[in-house]
Image (spheres, rainbow, N blue to C red):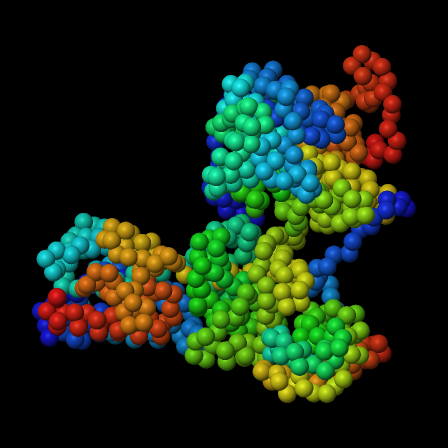
Amino acid sequence: MADFGFTIIKPRVIDYDSNDRRIAEYIFEREPSFRLCIECGACSATCSAGNFTRFSLREFNILLKRGENSYVKNELKKCMLCGKCTLVCPRGVNTRNVISLAQEAFIKLNGHEV
Amino acid sequence: MNSEGKKRIWSEYQKEIADDHFFYVRSCIRQSFFPGSEQFFLNFMRKDLGKDVFENPSHTTCTGIGYHGDIVPFSTTMTVVARHFALMKESGYKNIAISCVTSFGIYTEILETWKHFPEELEKTREYLYKATGREFDIPENMAHTSDIIYKFRDEISARAKYPLINRMTGEPLKVVEHIGCHYSKMFPKYGIGGAEFPRVLSGMIESWGGEVVDYPERRHCCGFGFRQYLVQANRGYSLSNTYKKFNSMKPYKPDLIITNCPGCNMFMDKWQYTIKAMEGTTFGSAGDSIPVLTYEEVAGLVLGYSPWDLGLQYHMVQSEPLLRKMGVDFNPDDKYKTKDGKNMPVPQNLINS
Amino acid sequence: MMEGKSVVVVGGGAAGMEAAGQLAKAGARVTIVEKESETGGHVSKWCYLFPDRRKSTEVIQYLNSQINQKNITLLTGEEVNLVEKKGGRFILTTSNGKELDADAVVLATGFDLFRSERKEEYGYGIYENVITSADLEVMFKKGEIRLTNGGVPQKIGFIHCVGSRDEKVGNLYCSKLCCVTAVKQAIEIKEFLKEARIFCFYMDMRMGGALYEELYHEAQVKHGISFIRGKVSEVSQTIDHRLVVKAEDTLAGRPLRMEIDMLVLMAGMEMSQGGKRIAQNSRIKTGENRFFLPADHHFGGNKSNVRGIYFAGACAAPMNITETISHARSAVQDVITYLSDGKQ
């Protein structure tokens, strides 16, 4: 095929309908408080990992809900599970459990259990 | 889809279009890429309708490409356009007919600027006078050439030889219309039908028997941009926008794309070639690409002008599948012949031919 | 002290009915002028109310009982065009050419719903299954939520701030009720259609009223309603007649595209045409938002620029029913003070 020195760019759009939201659904079912997240950013402001890396739990949460799983899977490792996010959350989201459940869901997804 | 809702919007965005005595201003690119379009406009207006359309040979670019490419400052653009107005005044005309959507956008932007910042108008008068000794008036009536064709669309329909109907099936042709961002997105009131549901091209299509395709990405930019396509490395950005539109219109199996703007036509036409060459994808029915014509070329076809006189062979995507659907009587042997019967060089790699 | 005094109340919605009822109780002779054939205004078009989902008919019942007094005269199918003050009294001219005489006037002309077709990009009146919050209430009253083809919608979107906080339509203000209405309606849809997925597209969630935030909480956790922060910029239609919504998911910082079956536009509130006409003809001041302008925002919320003319309810600013009723009562207080002051 011809090479013109430029390419067709993949859209940045979140294509909600074709994204896989099984990981999010898995968490919603087991940790309903996750639905309450309004992405205020209190968690990421205080996050141990977020102070030294690009990790943002706020961004993580929203992209997890949208089914942007490859991003989520990659970011997941950065959390140090310190629990400060849960402490500061004004909506009472058990953020630490969200991380653990995401971890679990990805393992099960690989084993086709989700 | 409810057409009453659209009609209500259209009734809110009507504009007065002069009936005669036009000062015609040219585009930079359309004479080179599809020269029959302008020829049709001038011939149709002058010969078919008997209108007075005047061209002044001293007219230049509006600087639109340079302005949007970040190399011409706005004050310069305003002065250049002021010079066009001066030429119009000197030639004794008050109605301007602009044949390019980029220019049309530039003119509307300037008129609005002068309205809201009268000091800019005064400065422009001064710049022009100092530079050229010329003085100008603001046009009494400003129309894009498609506005004028829109105005006379029913006259064309009354004389139609080949309406936009598939002769094989009797069904209306499915037509995508693309008005170009600068026709009305900046100032909806200057466009017939506004910006969200523009009427200028859809009105022609319906008048000539076709069916307008309202696909999800209808309102998206063709991807032309200016600073984007000028740099080779950035062209993927331009291409990707067009790609997105093509994918969105593909399920409707359009027979034809009608464009308002020379830039959109060039990109929607040539990017189909590029995409096909890059990844083999086509967007029309039966593996064809979709012919991309100007409203004037389509008007010419409808009136029975020869497709080769209209210059359809100058496009990258060839129109033969469309001509066959419309039942247009054409001689393939004349396609690359000059008027005096000489053979022109035949381009390679044309698609749909 | 109000015996023998006559007051005309312009508008027979919640504000006008409450004001009329309180004035009559205080002893005044009251005439309500209502442009429709029946009283009740916008409340009567709603099915259930926020935040507690009480039936609107209960509020209507209460309001009807307020105006069911012998010293209240009801004039329906008639509009007031002009209010003139002459020698300390008021003459109101109606659309039927009648002249009404009054010692004081309460303007309770309410609001008009924003005409959603003005937001052309959403295609109201063009694309099938783009409806307004008011249309949805009609469906609730009928007891079924259906697509134009008779099908059941599976995926429903709400667009907040249609005609509110929008410079393009000349409305900079917040209509205040639409956020909570969207949440209420989203929950109601979930109760009709258990399997439906619902998405609210908002600019800010303005849940400032009593029990509003709690309702929002319930919508999220109990009903699984999704809230996406981003103003929808454009709606279009697919070949299968589904609606395509384009928004930015501003909290993700990326554009978002979604296909849905039905879209509900949360139409805002605007000064009513009737109110505008009275303001213009009678030189009653209006604010930049075109609603009647209170003489003082802190302690003159019912006072107009003309002594003896008072505002009640949403003709002065967007307000909910609770606020409307309180506002009407305080208008009555002002009328009583004015009339017992000996009309200075």
The residue closer to the viewer here, A78 or B190, is A78
The residue closer to the viewer here, C18 or B46, is B46
Pick out the residue farthest to the front: B130
Q: Is residue B341 visible?
A: yes
Pick out the residue farthest to the right: A1
Q: Is residue C67 left or right of residue B37?
A: left
Seen at 59% across and 63% down, the residue is: C230
Q: Considering the image in quadrants, where does the C terminus of chain B appear?
A: top right
State whether residue B281 is above or below residue B318: below
Residue B109 rendering spot, x and y as whole percentages: 55, 40
Answer with the quarter of the image where residue B174 lies: top right
The residue closer to the viewer here, A88 or B332, is A88
State whether residue C4 is above or below residue C120: below
Residue C75 rendering spot, x and y as whole percentages: 21, 60
Q: Is residue B275 left or right of residue C169?
A: right
Residue B346 rendering spot, x and y as whole percentages: 87, 25
